[in-house]
Image: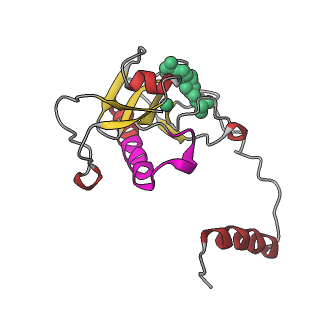
Amino acid sequence: MESFKVALPGGFPWCPRELKNEGLSWVKDSSCIFCQIIGEKAHGSIIHRDELVTAFMDIRPVNPGHLLVVPNEHTADLRALDEEVAGYIFKIGKRMARTLRETDLNCEGVNLHLADGSAAGQSVFHTHLHVIPRFGGDGLGFLIHGQGHVSPSREELDETAGIIMQALGEDVA
Ligand code: AMP
Ligand code: ZN
């Protein structure tokens, strides 16, 4: 993969100082549509850009205002994404959500959604956070709502928690 450099005007008012790098460069996959948009090799309706992330309109919005917050550096999914950048994506997503509620779109709520892996519904393999405006009665909904009918025993929940904690290296007993 190539390294891509671009000069960004106007500084990075939303980017915390400790996250800033020396150079404005990030890893680019030239076959990736989101890298192409970030690198201005493909059209995108860009809302925000700083050193770490770019936000642009989803080309097939599920509701008006549906946008994506995308790390500038190409990582196919969450596994390789830097933890600081992951947090920063959420920070910008939060800012976008608040902004959407203040617009004339009259958005009544917002879903933040990230699909990590094809089994989770990911179709573009450059990590991205969906910011989806919601309106009462818009008919959208995650299948997970109302699907949690199974009530495992406390022992079963603890057993599953133990598997995850072991992998994390956590011991909170
Ligand atoms: P996901 O299925 O979670 O990977 O989401 C991928 C999203 O990227 C979908 O909502 C697509 O509509 C959107 N998308 C795909 N190509 C483009 C593009 N060229 N510009 C903007 N959004 C895109
Ligand atoms: Zn990419």
**In the image, 104: left or right of 135?**
left
Q: Residue furthest top?
A: 43
Q: Is residue 79 above or below residue 165?
A: above
User: Which sits in the foreground, 107 or 55?
Assistant: 55
Q: Please state the total of marks drawn on the protein image.
A: 0
Q: Which residues are magenta?
A: 75-94
Inspect the magenta stretch and tell me whether residue 81 lies in it.
yes
Return the x and y of residue 83 as percentages of the image width and height: 45, 55
Which residue is drawn at the image coordinates 65% and 72% (left, top)? 165
Return the x and y of residue 46 as percentages of the image width and height: 35, 23
Q: For residue 152, what is the image quadrant?
A: bottom right
Q: Is residue 133 above or below residue 98?
A: above
Inspect the magenta stretch and tell me whether residue 66 lies in it.
no
**Whether residue 63 is visible:** no
Which residue is drawn at the image coordinates 23% and 30% (left, top)? 8
Q: Residue furthest front?
A: 2
**Whether residue 170 is visible:** yes
